[in-house]
Amino acid sequence: QVQLVESGGGLVQPGGSLRLSCAASGSIFRINAMGWYRQAPGKQRELVAALKRGGSTNYADSVKGRFTISRDNAKKTAYLQMNGLKPEDTAVYYCNADLNTLTGWGAYWGQGTQVTVSS
């Protein structure tokens, strides 16, 4: 069984920084991609950043230059470094992983971690 466990959310003042972590565990053969999504109250879930196996990245326009996605393959952990946080970044952040496991291919989600940017 695959699990994605996020950590690192919290309350931060505008202009501050946070680093989110997403640790994958279970019978994982291959991590094809990992990414971060967010969902603010009353809004649809949106892609924040994604990192493919080959190293290519994709960022939402609203976070380019402020957020950085990275991954530690040995630890099967993805990170989202968030700098220059703004109130509009407030949302629940979800980790997503595209994996090959014992039972085949699947897309998995973490439980979400709250990020609140407020003075």
Image (cartoon, grey):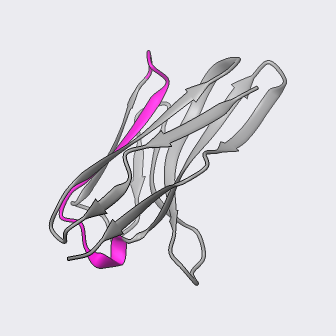
Query: Residue 5 placed where, x, y %?
Result: 55, 37
Q: In this rendered view, identify the residue nearer to me: 106 or 75.
A: 75
Residue lying furthest bottom: 42
> Which image quarter holds the C terminus?
bottom left
Residue in the picture at 60% in, 40% down: 97
Nearer the observer, 17 or 52? 17
Q: Is residue 75 above or below residue 41?
A: above
Q: Give residue 32's quadrant in the image.
A: top right
Between residue 51 and residue 21, name the one nearer to us.
Answer: 21
* In front of the other: 74 or 58: 74
Indicate left or right for 42 with 105 as reference: left
Residue range in magenta is 73-89
Q: Say whether residue 80 is magenta.
A: yes
Determine the residue positioned at 58% across, 84% down.
42
Residue 114: name its quadrant.
Answer: bottom left
Seen in the picture, residue 19 relative to 115 is either above or below; the reply is above
Q: Residue furthest left?
A: 15
Q: Residue visible at 20% across and 55% down?
A: 17
Residue 20: where, in percent of width, then height?
Answer: 37, 45
Q: Residue at x 60, y 76 (%)?
A: 44
- Horizontal side of 1 relative to 91 (left or right) equals right
Q: Where's residue 60, x and y in %? A: 40, 65
